[in-house]
Image: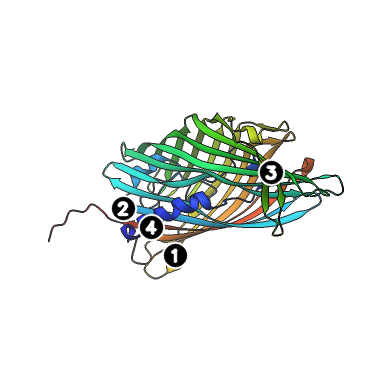
Amino acid sequence: MIKKILVSACLLLSLVSFAQEGTASPYSFYGIGDVRFKGTHEMRSMGGIAIEQDSIHINLQNPAGFASLKLTTFTLGGTYASTNLKTNTKAESAQRTTLDYLAVGLPLGKFGVGFGLIPYSSVGYKIRTLGTGVDNNQSFNGKGGMNKAFLGVGYKVNRELSVGADVNYDFGKIETNNFEYITDISIGTRELNNADLSGFNFNIGAMYQRKIDKKLSLFSSLTYSIESTLKSKNTRNIATALYNSNFDLVNVDVLEDMRTVENLKLPTKYAVSAGIGEARKWLVGIGYTFQDAGSLSNKYNALTNVSYEGSSKYNIGGYFMPNYNSFTSYAKRVTYRGGLRYEKTGLVINSLPIKDMAVSLGFGLPLTGTFSNVNISVEFGQKGTKKSNLIEENYANVSIGLSLNEQWFVKRKFN
């Protein structure tokens, strides 16, 4: 089953990852956009906790987890997001549907290999400010983002310890379109910026799991992302333009493109998490992530009232499974998940750090007669603030993911 859908799914995500607007946040104007959650919906519904050496779920946060896979695993996930944006005087709403990840994990004895495609960051906003008389009117549009194609390897040192590493190829394009005009004059100035992003980065990780007594186990995870350089090939074009009868922007006089190349810095990141539980029964974990301040502002979005600091994230979550091998009750085989997340994004506007906090719930629904499952999660959160003329975002995300499992590379005994 996995082989039949793998190629078409890869092509679908490859196309959609370029075309989709994965966010409706005005904060995606800054840096390389809104950084997306890196992980499957199973982990997202637990606040981002991913500490168990799971044999049938891919761990996208720690490459050491690939070593624990027992079956070939294919995973795919998408999200419907609804966002309400508020200032002290206005309110708007927006909706987005996105594909979040596609990945395959292969067990190879003590080794495990994983590869796939993940949208890393998203840009998507439409803002208009209207004046009267000789006041300036402005419109700001942005779209695009950055994606990661990754290849990772995990190795099981012994029953308790696994280590791993992955390499990521970063690529994508960000387009911003700014138009300014005076109310009583139909022609204004349009500035179009395109940034083509590319680069490589590397992660290493380790996972440790040990029995405390007959039932309880200690779980832990550690990852380290190495600082890397992201090349941005920028093109800026200035033109006079006007809106036609369909309110589409039409260029009148276009100047010659201006081209530059900048090196952005993806900063070092550390993540550590630990927890306690009974395997395939229940688990509770906590985590902490810290990322150094990056150098991510490009020429078109470098502003005097904006700066970047080190980001940090705290999360807590877990799961409960009443009886994973119950023959009489489907509800007892369902995995019930929940979590909390609090994050300082590292973005500072008007001297105020932009924060993001959320609560999440989820369900893992097993497909009868298989090791595969459907995972559903909901997340409610708030980002930003209405203070200092900024924007507060209240969002609700509904996510669905598939984790399909089969056994490959089995030598036939009979023809």
Give the number of the mark in front: 4 or 2: 4
Q: Of the two numbered discs 2 and 3 on the same chain, state the one appearing first in sequence.
A: 2
Amino acid type of the residue that numbered disc 2 sits on in the rendered structure = Leu
Q: Give the Cα separation between the discs numbered 4 and 2.
A: 21 Å
| Image height of 91 relative to 156, above or below | below
Q: Of the two numbered discs 4 and 2 on the same chain, state the one appearing first in sequence.
A: 4
* Pointer 1 local density, CA inside 10 Å: few below 14, some 14–19, many at least 20: some
Looking at the image, do the residues carrying marks 2 and 3 touch, with CB atoms under 8 Å apart? Answer: no
Count the marks: 4
Q: Give the Cα separation between the discs numbered 2 and 1.
A: 23 Å
Looking at the image, do the residues carrying marks 4 and 2 touch, with CB atoms under 8 Å apart? Answer: no
* Residue 325 coordinates in the image, percent (x, y): 37, 62
Looking at the image, do the residues carrying marks 2 and 1 touch, with CB atoms under 8 Å apart? Answer: no
Residue 226's mark? none
* Residue 241 coordinates in the image, percent (x, y): 70, 46
* Pointer 4 local density, CA inside 10 Å: few below 14, some 14–19, many at least 20: few
State the residue position of label 3: 178
Which residue occupies the foreground of this view, 221 or 182? Answer: 182
Q: Could you tell me which secondary element the residue under label 3 belongs to?
A: strand
Q: Give the Cα separation between the discs numbered 1 and 4.
A: 34 Å
Q: Could you tell me which secondary element the residue under label 2 belongs to?
A: loop
State the residue position of label 1: 332
Residue 203 appears in the picture as rendered: yes
Give the number of the mark in front: 1 or 4: 4
Q: Could you tell me which secondary element the residue under label 1 belongs to?
A: helix
* Pointer 3 local density, CA inside 10 Å: few below 14, some 14–19, many at least 20: some
Amino acid type of the residue that numbered disc 3 sits on in the rendered structure = Asn
State the residue position of label 2: 71
State the residue position of label 4: 8
Give the number of the mark in front: 2 or 1: 2
